[in-house]
Image (spheres, grey):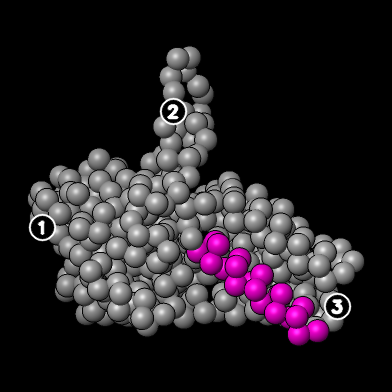
Amino acid sequence: MATPLHLEKLPKSLELVFSDDHAKLRYLDQRYLPNECRMVETEDWHDVCDAIAVLGVRGAPAIGIAGASAIAMWVENQAVIIDDNDFSEALQLVANDVIAVRPTAVNLKWAVDRTVAYALDLLDNGCPFEQMGSKVCSFVQELAANDESCNRAIGAAGAAVIPGDAKILTHCNAGSLATYFYGTALGVIYCAAEQGKVQRVYADETRPLGQGARLTVWELAQVGVPTTLICDNMAASLMAKGEIDCVVVGADRITSNGDTANKIGTYGVAILAKHHGIPFYVAAPSSTFDFALKTGNEIPIEQRADCEVLPEPIAGVDIYNPAFDVTPAELITAIITEKGVFAPSELSKLKELL
């Protein structure tokens, strides 16, 4: 029996707005969820970088759009134009600063590079500087709209592999909050739920910052999907009891062999799923693939601040706080994309499609 969802209750995670010759980014500051839906507006591209760094905006597709928005905002609001060469050099410096904020999620570089290329193409084709800002903003708005379309296609492709009456485990937040709208891993769940295939979703809390506890369960509850929050160390016991039918997670970077970087703890969940014979699915758009890298060993892993793990330091205690880990391809059943569902061994077919 189909489950009616209330997607209208989910706010857009971010949106680039252009009006009165000013570009501004309006975003939901996710640090305050689930207690407060705090919307923030800024016209300063530096503020966007700060928001990405502190996880006010987070999720691979969402930070891609935010990074592209930062470029558009610089072009419209803050570019000091002397000549074409100065513009090109300054734009690339800004782009480098934006990309460096979070190095693991390749979507950030993907979106920034495309926005920069579009702006330089306008320049090469003689577009007047006073018109460039609005055109670049329109380009970023199109990227955002395409992200939602892509997520819905991922959802439709993924729903086909979800069994009926499924109990699904997910880790971190790969939902609407992590994208422009709808989500990747949660997009699969939303589409499957609308088809009546989801009995319950179990969401790991996702230490140390609790993206599952603060964001995923809030989002699922808003939409109307039956949801249970569990501590990270409870997944194994649920699997042993036969309470998990499949795992669906998102991704921040996928290499050409199918190795996948995702939020820290994903690797452990994949090992547990393999041991218990449970399908483990990764849902991600094509912008998350980095075919220039052969294996996950080449993925740069972001290291986060000590205070995220231990707010008050203890003398003599060091902190290890990587934001991501890498799940080897052999632990992944299939990767769900907007182009279809592929086993890691079939990614050459996806590369041809792209």
Q: Are marks 1 and 2 in contact (CB under 8 Å)?
A: no
Residue at 17% across, 63% down: 279
Picture layout, residue 277 above or below residue 187: above
Residue at 55% across, 62% down: 109
In primary-sequence order, the first of circles 2 and 3 is 3
- Three-letter code for the amino acid on which mark 1 is drawn: Gly
- Residue 125 in percent (x, y) is at 76, 85
Q: Please tell me the numbered disc located at residue 277.
A: 1
- Residue 18 in percent (x, y) is at 74, 74
The magenta stretch spans residue 109? yes
In primary-sequence order, the first of circles 1 and 2 is 1
Q: Which residue matches tag 2?
A: 319
As helix, strand or loop, the secondary structure at mark 3 comes to: helix
In depth, the one of 105 and 354 nearer the eye is 354
Note whether residue 18 is visible: yes
Residue at 18% across, 49% down: 272
Which stretch did the figure color magenta?
107-126
The magenta stretch spans residue 261? no
- Three-letter code for the amino acid on which mark 2 is drawn: Ile
Q: Is residue 89 rendered to the left or right of residue 39?
A: right
Q: Is residue 161 rendered to the left or right of residue 224?
A: left
Picture layout, residue 326 above or below residue 133: above
Q: Which residue matches tag 3?
A: 130
